[in-house]
Image: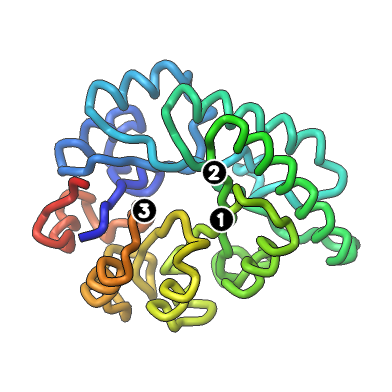
Amino acid sequence: MPRFAANLTMLFNELEFLDRFQAAAEAGFTGVEYLFPYPFDKRTLAAALTRWNLAQVLHNLPAGDWAAGERGIAILPDRVSEFQRGVFEAIDYATMLGCRQVNCLVGVAPPGIEPARLHETLVNNLRFAAHELGQEGIALLVEPINTRDIPGFFLNTTAQALRLLDDVDSPNLFLQYDIYHMQIMEGDLARTIEANLDRIAHIQLADNPGRNEPGTGEINFPFLYRHLDAIGYAGWVGCEYKPASDTRDGLSWLPGKSLAA
């Protein structure tokens, strides 16, 4: 059975953020992920992980002004210095938290800039980040996101993401495959994951439509869990969904309630 990590940005929102670590552990999770650690003192986060015996599975690079609608700055030619500073901030946090992989949200394409220039900026930024993170034993991931939830997001499909990986040409850059986003954009989930297993470092899930817990929509998750086992996927599966009601009440989807590695 896959290893499931609780996404604390999405789950247990009934609680203050720092209380969600305890809730995740008590629900049986052994790993956690969330969008950004940076609003919190890294020592406080590390203490929560230790106290509740949780692995920090993933967090994102700084992604600009999230509250203002920014969803990453890696494609923006006038934000390269800010991006590079964010790489070092991510290394600082990931090292303290024992997190071995960091995701890069590439951003929404701004008007008035040629896509080729945005792509060139992105490739150069990812080469920089992959190298610097690799020096610390931290993998860099990129994630395609559907255009319904984030219109204009620059990276939308598996094929586009794989071409980007080829252009960057770094052994430390991998694909983060989000089942929810890719069901919307392309479907064919099982075959795509199997065909690109060596390039996928992390998987996330939510059902579609609604982005709620597995079993609320059209995706055959029991089949996908068996498929991941059959093809030898060894990474984590991040539960990045919006609970339809109380998080705990919605956890009945978990296979056998067995979450440990």
State how far apart marks 2 and 3 are (Cα). 13 Å
Which residue is denoted by mark 2 in the rendering? 139
- Residue 217 quadrant: bottom left
Q: Quadrant of the N terminus?
A: bottom left
| Left or right: where 89 falls relative to 260 | right
Q: Determine the secondary structure under disc 2.
A: strand
The reply to whether callout 1 and callout 2 are in contact (CB within 8 Å) is yes
| x and y, in percent, of residue 255 in the image | 14, 62
Which residue is denoted by mark 3 in the rendering? 235
State how far apart marks 3 and 1 are (Cα). 12 Å
Neighbours of disc 2 within 10 Å: few (<14), some (14-19), many (20+)? many
Q: Determine the secondary structure under disc 1.
A: strand
- Amino acid of disc 3: Gly
Of the pair 56 and 37, the residue shown nearer to us = 56
| x and y, in percent, of residue 120 in the image | 84, 57
| x and y, in percent, of residue 188 in the image | 44, 83
